[in-house]
Amino acid sequence: MKHAVKKVGMMGGTFDPIHCGHLLAAEQAREQAGLDEIWFMPTHIPPHKQRDSLTLAEHRLNMVQMAVADHEAFRVTDIELRREGPSYTYDTMVQLTQQFPDCQFSFIIGGDMVKILPKWYQFQELLRMVRFIGLARPGTELDREASEYVTFVEMPVWDISSTLIREKAAAGKSIRYLVPAAVERYIKENRFYETLD
Ligand SMILES: Nc1ncnc2c1ncn2[C@@H]1O[C@H](COP(=O)(O)OP(=O)(O)OP(=O)(O)O)[C@@H](O)[C@H]1O
Ligand SMILES: O=C(O)c1ccc[n+]([C@@H]2O[C@H](COP(=O)([O-])O)[C@@H](O)[C@H]2O)c1
């Protein structure tokens, strides 16, 4: 018997830490693109980001797990944390498409990332394995060229980032409601982000 195809949206990120913007983005993409599941995937080493000291992978993973635990369609994969070197999405998708032949994968990205997509490692090959879902500001003009490989979904803009969370935490300011409560507790208990790197 042939299995039904499962539509999976990959939400990759450094997640240092995961915040409510990531969760809102994933949920809007899930609903608007009709995805069955979202797989959150913390990167081992982000390919295009320069930061000297990321929080330990184990802790970033724990925070992601806590953040998504109450959503029935949200899952977490540590596939990139188990691989050495920069976490190129192409390498990951080769592994995932082999491991899960019944899944159809999309990759969710923030709207600001769309213009640099063609610079991703093995971009043309990657396009054979995934379509991209870009989060667009409601009413924004869409990049027609990118529409060949990006499906845009609308999301109210939340100008929050992990950088903002780290800066607020280092300044002793509140991060309540910017991250899920369990993540806020975990950050406090472990004294993360008390200084900026
Ligand atoms: N507020 C947000 N709204 C929509 N998408 C977001 C938001 N914040 C991050 N993203 C998207 O989530 C994905 C993972 O992001 P990442 O983990 O690098 O978080 P970040 O907040 O951008 O981190 P940092 O501030 O450390 O650079 C990226 O595709 C990014 O564009
Ligand atoms: O494969 C690439 O060349 C590539 C370049 C930039 C970003 N990515 C992926 O995009 C996701 C979000 O990246 P970032 O830098 O915002 O954490 C994360 O899963 C990265 O591995 C992938």
Image: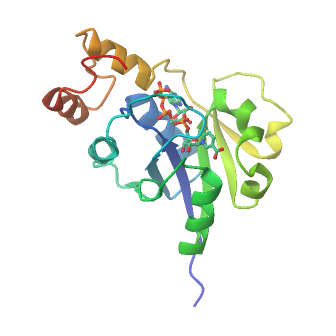
| Nearer the observer, 189 or 57 | 57
Which of the image's four quarters has the N terminus?
Answer: bottom right
Indicate whether 145 appears above or below 7. Answer: above
Tell me if 88 is positioned left or right of 21 in this view: right
Inspect this view and state whether residue 100 appears: no
Inspect this view and state whether residue 87 appears: yes
Residue in view at x 58 percent, y 43 percent: 108
Instruction: Tell me where residue 14 appears, x and y as whole percent.
Output: 45, 38
What coloring was used for the rendering?
rainbow
Number of dots carrying numbers: 0
Please, which residue is most extreme toward the left here?
Answer: 189
Q: Which corner quadrant of the image does residue 96 belong to?
A: bottom right
Indicate whether 155 appears above or below 41. Answer: above
| Nearer the observer, 46 or 32 | 46
Tell me if 66 is positioned left or right of 92 in this view: left
Indicate whether 85 appears above or below 143. Answer: below
Residue in view at x 40 percent, y 56 percent: 78
Instruction: Tell me where residue 182 appears, x and y as whole percent.
Output: 21, 36
Q: Which corner quadrant of the image does residue 175 belong to?
A: top left
Please, which residue is most extreme toward the right here?
Answer: 145
Which of the image's four quarters has the C terminus?
Answer: top left
| Nearer the observer, 10 or 93 | 93
Instruction: Tell me where residue 84 appears, x and y as whole percent.
Output: 48, 55
Please, which residue is most extreme toward the bottom here?
Answer: 1
Quarter of the rendered structure image containing ligand 2: top right
Tell me if 154 is positioned left or right of 31 in this view: right
Indicate whether 103 appears above or below 193. Answer: below
Instruction: Tell me where residue 195 appears, x and y as whole percent.
Output: 28, 16
